[in-house]
């Protein structure tokens, strides 16, 4: 006869207590708040996939340039003179913007302020050489200047002379720099255009520096040519 087990079989009372403990650990859900069955979740996922496939063609498809809020194609290049802004700038504004960069060639002597250096380099601000006839100015910058020069009542003597730098610049860049110095630091004068520079270069074959006496006949003469309407043509000197 076998020995009795040391662990008695649980009776019905033990099972009831076990079920009650499990029930206490599991959260009771109110009617209507039970988790959705898995087939319902699968159905909604399928609907979302089908709807997305139809939405793309109906809206023209996804495009990064269209959908990106920072796209240049959408908003235009915000930089001055970039994108659609270039078309909005008039010829005078364009010449001033580009001429400011080209002025670096002159700024080493005449300074960023246009005031030059006393006794060494004459000022461009308020200079009669800058604001006077455009023929004299373009000849100086194109070919250079040598000997004594009087600017705003002060004498400047260039033993080696000012070297011309126009030959190393395109007609457009050259015109932009001249327009810039004629309309900066309080200066105000009509712009000089690329067409004016091109005509001058076609007619003038000089290759040596000028003297002040040689330039006297040109001090009040202006280069022929049309000036675009706008701020660069409003100075009385343009009439």
Image (cartoon, helix red, strand yellow):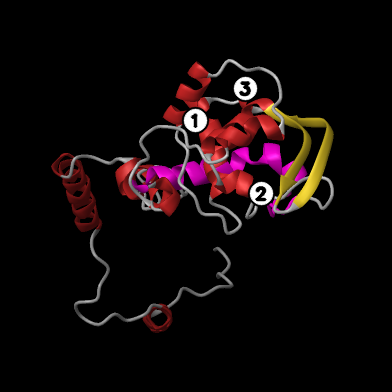
Q: CA distance from mark 3 to mark 2?
A: 21 Å
Is 90 colored magenta in this rendering?
yes
Assign the N terminus to one quadrant of the image. Answer: bottom right
> Please, is residue 148 above or below residue 239 in the view?
above
Q: CA distance from mark 1 to mark 2?
A: 21 Å
Name the N-terminal-most of marks 3 and 1. Answer: 3
For label 2, the residue is 124
Nearest the camera: 72 or 132? 132
SS at badge 1: helix
Residue 183 in the image: x percent, y percent?
Answer: 53, 51
Other-residue count near label 2 (Cα within 10 Å), few / some / many at <14 / 14–19 / ≥20: many
Q: Residue at x 59, y 26 (%)?
A: 169
In the rendered view, does 94 fall on the left or right side of 181? left
Extent of the magenta region: 88-116
Residue 101 in the image: x percent, y percent?
Answer: 60, 41
Residue 65 in the image: x percent, y percent?
Answer: 34, 42
SS at badge 2: loop
Q: Is residue 53 visible?
A: yes
Nearest the camera: 127 or 65? 127
Q: Main secondary structure of the magenta part?
A: helix
When asked about the image quadrant of residue 137, the answer is top right
Name the N-terminal-most of marks 3 and 2. Answer: 2
Is 24 colored magenta in this rendering?
no
Q: Is residue 71 visible?
A: no
Other-residue count near label 3 (Cα within 10 Å), few / some / many at <14 / 14–19 / ≥20: few
Residue 167's disc number: 3
For label 1, the residue is 172
Residue 160 in the image: x percent, y percent?
Answer: 84, 29
């Amino acid at each position: 006869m076998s020995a009795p087990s040391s662990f008695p079989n649980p009776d019905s009372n033990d099972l009831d207590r076990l079920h009650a403990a499990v029930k206490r650990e599991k959260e009771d859900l109110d009617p209507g708040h039970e988790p959705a069955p898995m087939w319902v979740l699968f159905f909604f996922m399928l609907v979302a996939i089908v709807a997305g496939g139809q939405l793309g063609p109906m809206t023209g498809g996804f495009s990064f340039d269209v959908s990106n809020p920072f796209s240049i194609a959408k908003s235009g290049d915000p930089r001055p003179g970039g994108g659609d802004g270039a078309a909005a700038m008039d010829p005078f504004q364009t010449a001033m913007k580009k001429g400011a960069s080209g002025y670096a060639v002159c700024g080493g002597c005449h300074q960023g302020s246009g005031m030059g250096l006393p006794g060494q380099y004459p000022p461009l601000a308020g200079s009669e050489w800058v604001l006077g006839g455009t023929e004299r100015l373009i000849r100086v910058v194109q070919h250079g200047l040598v000997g004594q020069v009087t600017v705003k009542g002060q004498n400047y003597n260039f033993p080696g002379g000012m070297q011309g730098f126009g030959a190393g610049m395109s007609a457009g860049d050259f015109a932009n720099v001249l327009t810039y110095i004629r309309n900066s630091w309080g200066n105000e004068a009509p712009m000089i255009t690329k067409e004016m520079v091109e005509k001058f270069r076609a007619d003038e074959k000089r290759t040596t520096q000028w003297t002040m006496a040689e330039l006297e006949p040109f001090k009040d003469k202006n280069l022929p040519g049309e000036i675009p309407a706008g701020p660069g043509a409003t100075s009385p000197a343009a009439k």
